[in-house]
Image (cartoon, helix red, strand yellow):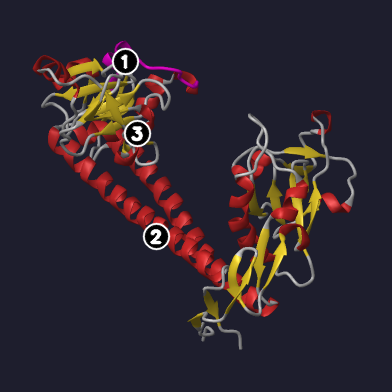
Amino acid sequence: MAEEIEFYRETEFKDTEIGRIPREWEVMVAADVADYINGYPFSPADWKMHGVPIIRIQNLNDPNAEFNCFDGKVDDIYKIKNGDLLFSWSASIGIHIWKGGDAVLNQHIFKVVPKANINKLFLYYGLLLAIEQLKSRVHGSTMKHFQKNELKTIFMPIPPLPEQQKIAEILSTIDEAIQKTDDIIAKTERLKKGLMQELLTKGIGHKEFKDTEIGRIPKNWEVKKLKEIAEQMYYGLSVSGVEAPTQYKLITTTSINKETFKLDEGKVPFCNLITNEDKQTKKLTKYFVKKEDILVSRSGTTGVVILVDKDYKNMLFGSYLIKIKLNSLIDPKFFWYFSQSLFYWQQVSPRGATIKNINLQILKNLQVPLPSLEEQRKISEILLTADEKLENLRRERIKLDRIKQWFMEELLSGRIRVRVT
């Protein structure tokens, strides 16, 4: 049986330079809780195709980033193994627990070695909070960094070692739950992608197929150009007036959630327009978005398609978006899923090149596979079920993040204590 954890609210505090902390805790500066060993200054001439991976900042920020390697000799202090604590102090400020296997450390990253009375995992969480102090002090206009001696000005509340260990166990348990949720999300996304490819190429229950300009599809499907199935296609509103803020919001490319292919309402800013005259209001009518409108980003997050899921009375769409209103031959949800498929991206971005912009001419000639309306809706329903599962998982992920943040703030400040037996 797992050991029961007992929490209690602290009532006995003492005043310190960082505020009130429990009486038996102490305050230490970040420089004194660990040794900070800067990585080796590898140059591009040292980079090889084979050898031991070199940990650079991009390898901390992106687990899928490619490694440069080193095949020579390097001092043991620069060697990294799983579980080591790494602190990037330039370009991207962050604390990381290394999980990528044996490697060597590049400059601009500290290997953090805790002192004898400091639990490494506790230090990781403590530095996660303390780093916010450092971020407010970073230097440089383009290459953000902080100086090592600033670690002497970062104060941290430190409980006795047994309590450090308990706090670390609690927070790491939450992190494990977050990682499991991330793994399930990634697996569900892969399953949805495979399901989408299967449904958009083979449909439901078909036995006979034919070759078309966009690939092999069921024999009784059609292929239509978008201009044949769209009632309207036009660019958004270009806003130049700044005379008075209005009640209207303007959807831009930054309003698109690239993870869910939906509108992120919290990122739709109010715009400045002159709207006092009836004439101006009528002029704006075509730029309002309604349920089942399709919006295509033509630059920035280029080519990404969102489906408007409800009517908005105060939202206009901007000039870096193209609005499409589909006719009765195609279900908007089916088109939206099609726009997430290889069928779509191979046409708007041939040869896999990065596209800088997209225009009406490209979209008008976009070729779309077209099952019967009934089958379109069945395909959409199946994929919608996968999306609903993903949405629930992402909500759970957000909830876990909030739980972790609350526990970090309460436990690491000593306001909430964990009983050590």
Residue carrying label 1: 240
> Mark 2 or mark 1, which is nearer the start of the sequence?
1
**Amino acid marked by disc 3:** Ser
Q: Which mark lies nearer to you, 3 or 1? A: 1
Q: What stretch is highlighted in magenta?
A: 353-367
Q: How many marks?
A: 3
> Mark 3 or mark 2, which is nearer the start of the sequence?
3
Please say if 218 is above or below 233.
Answer: below
Q: Is the magenta stretch mostly helix, strand or loop?
A: loop
The residues tagged by marks 2 and 3 sit, at their Cα atoms, a distance apart of 22 Å
Residue 335, image quadrant: top left
Q: Where is residue 345 in the image (x, y as percent from the top left)?
A: 39, 26
Residue carrying label 2: 399
Q: Position of residue 388 (x, y in %)?
A: 28, 51
Q: Where is residue 257 in the image (x, y as percent from the top left)?
A: 37, 38
The residues tagged by marks 1 and 2 sit, at their Cα atoms, a distance apart of 40 Å
The residues tagged by marks 3 and 1 sit, at their Cα atoms, a distance apart of 19 Å
Query: Does the magenta segment cover residue 382?
Result: no
Please say if 66 is above or below 103.
Answer: above
- Residue, x 17% and y 25% (percent of image)? 326
In the foreground, 65 or 42: 42
149 relative position to 176: left or right: right
- Residue 242 can be seen, yes or no: yes
Numbered tag placed on residue 255 in the rendering: 3
Q: Where is residue 320 in the image (x, y as percent from the top left)?
A: 34, 20
**Amino acid marked by disc 1:** Ser
In the foreground, 15 or 1: 15
In the picture as drawn, the residue positioned furthest to the top comes out as 361
